[in-house]
């Protein structure tokens, strides 16, 4: 079979690899149980309900292991709260979550967590748990970045789930009773990565902690 471009060739090569990866995730999750907390809306990650549910289960299991709350559920009742969370699911290292809660006075608090023993057959444990204070100027700069990258209108799904071994980025937000989630693979770089870097690197540095 001939392909019109290197990109088309790469996509056709990577698609079976990605489907095998998803099949492996499905097998690993098949016998797992976790709280019935709903972390995501229906069909959030794919128009196909079954595929979307598979991704939601994968992401939800990790958020549960990280002992993270559901922003989706919280957005229904906490209409005056603004929160952003970046969840990183690397292929070979520990899952991490960075949850930024913005206070009414313009300051914020960044919760950083990392879970160990994932996929080892052992019970997952919280290996890292930090709570970092973020000053108002840093929060203001961050919110400008969120706005300039049009986070609240970004499509949830990436154009393709194809990708080599890397990291899945899940960026959630809630404000004014509204909830939004965006997922991206490690590459290419874009708005999600810019906002995510601001959360896990720039804000942490402002608090005096290097990530």
Image (cartoon, helix red, strand yellow):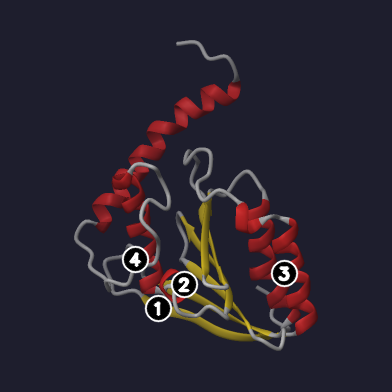
Residues at marks 4 and 1, CA–CA distance in whole angstroms: 10 Å
- Image quarter for residue 56? bottom left
Whichever of callouts 4 and 3 sits on the residue coming sooner in the sequence is: 4
Q: Is residue 77 above or below residue 22?
A: below
Residues at marks 2 and 4, CA–CA distance in whole angstroms: 15 Å
Q: Relative to the observer, which residue lies in front, 208 or 157? A: 157
Residues at marks 2 and 1, CA–CA distance in whole angstroms: 12 Å
Whichever of callouts 3 and 1 sits on the residue coming sooner in the sequence is: 1
Q: Is residue 153 above or below residue 99?
A: above
Mark 3 falls on what kind of element?
Answer: helix
Name the residue rendered at 50%, 46% in the picture.
Answer: 157
Give the x, y percent position of residue 149.
71, 55
- Image quarter for residue 82? bottom right
Whichever of callouts 3 and 2 sits on the residue coming sooner in the sequence is: 2
Mark 4 falls on what kind of element?
Answer: helix
Mark 1 falls on what kind of element?
Answer: loop
Badge 3, how many Cα within 10 Å: few under 14, some, many 20+?
some
Badge 4, how many Cα within 10 Å: few under 14, some, many 20+?
some
Q: Relative to the observer, which residue lies in front, 114 or 152? A: 152
Residues at marks 4 and 3, CA–CA distance in whole angstroms: 29 Å
Determine which residue is flagged by label 2.
71
Which label number is shown at residue 143? Answer: 3
Badge 2, how many Cα within 10 Å: few under 14, some, many 20+?
many
Q: How many marks?
A: 4
Determine which residue is flagged by label 1.
67
- The nearer-to-camera label among 3 and 1 is 3
Residues at marks 3 and 1, CA–CA distance in whole angstroms: 26 Å
Name the residue rendered at 37%, 51% in the picture.
Answer: 43
- The nearer-to-camera label among 4 and 3 is 3
Name the residue rendered at 42%, 32% in the picture.
Answer: 15
Determine which residue is flagged by label 4.
61
């Amino acid at each position: 079979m001939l392909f019109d471009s290197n990109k088309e060739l790469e996509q056709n090569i990577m698609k079976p690899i990605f489907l095998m990866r998803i099949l492996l995730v499905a097998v690993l999750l098949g016998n797992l149980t976790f709280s019935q907390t709903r972390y995501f809306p229906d069909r959030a990650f794919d128009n196909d309900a079954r595929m979307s549910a598979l991704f939601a289960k994968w992401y939800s299991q990790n958020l549960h292991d990280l002992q993270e709350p559901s922003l989706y559920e919280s957005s229904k009742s906490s209409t005056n709260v603004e929160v952003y969370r970046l969840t990183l699911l690397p292929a070979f290292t520990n899952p991490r979550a960075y949850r930024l809660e913005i206070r009414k006075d313009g300051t914020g608090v960044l919760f950083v967590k990392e879970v160990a023993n994932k996929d080892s057959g052992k019970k997952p444990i919280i290996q890292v748990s930090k709570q970092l204070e973020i000053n108002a100027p840093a929060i203001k700069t961050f919110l400008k970045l969120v706005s300039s990258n049009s986070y609240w209108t970004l499509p949830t799904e990436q154009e393709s789930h194809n990708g080599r071994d890397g990291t899945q980025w899940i960026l959630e937000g809630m404000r004014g009773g509204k909830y939004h989630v965006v997922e991206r693979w490690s590459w290419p770089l874009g708005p999600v990565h810019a906002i995510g870097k601001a959360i896990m690197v720039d804000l942490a540095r402002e608090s005096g902690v290097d990530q």
